[in-house]
Image (spheres, rainbow, N blue to C red):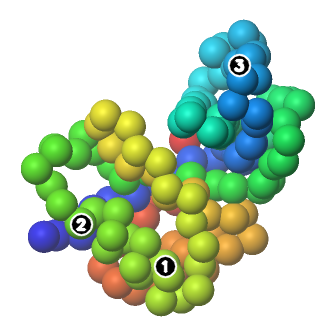
Amino acid sequence: MSKQTLQLHSTVFTIHSLDVDSPIPNDLFKQHIFFISKTHDELSIVCPSSFNIDSLDAEHNWLALEVVGPLGFSLTGIMANISGVLASASISIFALSTYDTDYVLVKKQRIDDAIKTLKKDGYTVLKEPI
């Protein structure tokens, strides 16, 4: 499989942990990009850091690398390969997927290392932020 192209987003994200029964702030839906995940015992929201959420815990200063898609559901190993390359360089990630593509969030202070590592492994990384 050929290496994918990744696009750096300029938005700085915060990953929030909330009580499973917490209401989702209505204004969140006005943000240009956000992610919500809920299970039987947790609620997580990933949103621009400029949007304030009263959460139980939060991880700040993440940047997103979007795998340029759309990606077909028959494609396999995309996230495994990308996360493996970054893990070999001791770069932690937070992975997200949508219907059309995948996002790899990397701490802002490690983004240059992540881009360099991915390029060295044959990935194209577009640094013009969107």
Pointer 1 local density, CA inside 10 Å: few below 14, some 14–19, many at least 20: many
Residue 45 seen in the figure? yes
Q: Earlier in the sequence, mark 2 or mark 1?
A: 2
Pointer 3 local density, CA inside 10 Å: few below 14, some 14–19, many at least 20: some
Q: Amino acid at mark 2?
A: Gly
Q: Quadrant of the C terminus?
A: top right
Is residue 24 left or right of 73 when viewed as pictured?
right
Using the image, tell me which numbered label, if any, was put on residue 36.
Answer: none
Q: Residue at x 81, y 48 (%)?
A: 58
Instruction: Identify residue for label 2.
Output: 77
**What is the x, y in percent for residue 57?**
84, 47
Camera-side residue of 55 and 90: 55
How many numbered callouts? Answer: 3
Q: Are marks 2 and 3 in contact (CB under 8 Å)?
A: no
Which quadrant of the view contains residue 111?
Answer: bottom right
Instruction: Identify residue for label 1.
Output: 86
Q: Earlier in the sequence, mark 2 or mark 3?
A: 3
Q: Would you place residue 60 above or below residue 80 in this image?
A: above
- Give the alpha-carbon distance from disc 1 to disc 3, as whole Å: 32 Å
Q: Residue at x 72, y 23 (%)?
A: 21
Is residue 17 left or right of 96 when viewed as pictured?
right
Using the image, tell me which numbered label, if any, was put on residue 24.
Answer: 3
Q: Would you place residue 35 above or below residue 114 in this image?
A: above
Q: Amino acid at mark 1?
A: Leu
Q: Earlier in the sequence, mark 1 or mark 3?
A: 3
- Give the alpha-carbon distance from disc 2 to disc 1, as whole Å: 14 Å
Residue 35 seen in the figure? no
Q: Residue at x 31, y 34 (%)?
A: 99
**What is the x, y in percent for residue 109?**
75, 71
**What is the x, y in percent for residue 110?**
67, 74
Is residue 25 left or right of 4 when viewed as pictured?
right
Camera-side residue of 83 and 19: 19
